[in-house]
Amino acid sequence: MTLSAVLLAGGKSRRMGQDKAMMRFGVAPLWQIQLDLLRKVQPTELFISAQIDPVWRPADVKFAPDNQPARGPISGIAATLSRMNTDHLLAFAIDMPFMTENYLRELREHIGPNRGVVPTIEDRFEPLAAIYPRSAHVDFAEALFGNDSSLQPLVKKLVAGGKLQPIQISDEERQLFRNLNEPQDL
């Protein structure tokens, strides 16, 4: 089964007070760290989704402008699902710098024909480090015009419909899902 990957970089970074993509984390900006990580998983296609094409986007990475109306990550995932040429899409948030190549590779081991995988912590999904089947595009397109821009109800619907398999995150793996939302998170 073939895999595309998208780096979701369309947030406004209001709580952080600056563009997360451009923030340095260690020796490099977050966008570079996260793209390097996604490249290690060897996707067939690599995308960046944002509201506008970022000036830092490398030439070998495709741009998927967020679908309108702007509905947060739903818009970016919907846009990429409609443009990709593979069976599955690894959606990954720009603000998760603790994620590892090994964990993303393990996620890939859980996908099947027309079925992706979503990590869960207790009863909460982690949809911004998940793999979606191409067939989920219809569900994302419908969600764009719904009343709720949260991914939780949409992912719950995809799980119930057999399009996503939930997998529990172990206590040791929880740290991988830490994200950077506010300056003190650094």
Image (cartoon, helix red, strand yellow):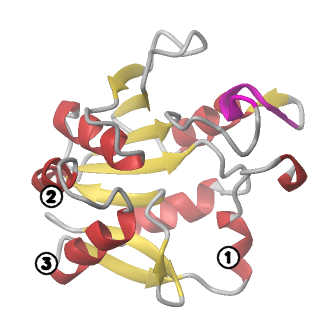
**Residue 28 included in the magenta stretch of the image:** no
Q: Amino acid at mark 1?
A: Glu
Q: Position of residue 46 (x, y in %)?
A: 41, 31
Between residues 180 and 45, which one lies in front from this camera angle?
Answer: 180
Residue at image point 18% right, 70% down: 163
Q: State how far apart marks 3 and 1 are (Cα).
A: 26 Å
What residue is shown at x 79% (from left), y 50% (from top)? 182
Locate residue 17: give its quadrant: top right
The reply to whether dot 2 and dot 3 touch (C-beta < 8 Å) is yes
Q: Secondary structure at mark 1?
A: helix
The first of marks 2 and 3 along the sequence is 2
Q: Give SS at disc 2.
A: helix
Q: Which residue is mark 2?
A: 139
Amino acid carrying label 2: it is Asp
Few, some or many residues within 10 Å of mark 3 (<14, 14–19, 20+):
few
**Residue 98 occupies which quadrant of the picture?**
bottom right
Q: Position of residue 111 (x, y in %)?
A: 29, 67
Amino acid type shown at disc 3: Gly
Q: Look at the numbered disc 3 and give the secondary structure of its residue.
A: loop
Specify which label sits upstream in the sequence, 2 or 1.
Answer: 2
Tell me the magenta residue range.
18-25
Circle number at residue 161 = 3
Look at the image and say whether residue 20 sits in the magenta stretch: yes
**Mark closer to the observer (3, 1):** 3
Question: Please, is residue 38 above or below residue 155 in the view?
Answer: above
In the image, taking residue 1 as reference, residue 186 lies left or right, namely right
Give the number of the disc on residue 173.
1
Q: Reply above or below: 125 against 50.
A: below
Which tag, 3 or 1, sits closer to the chain's start?
3
Task: Please name whichever residue, 167 or 142, is drawn nearer the observer in this view of the structure.
Answer: 142
**95, 116: nearer the viewer:** 95
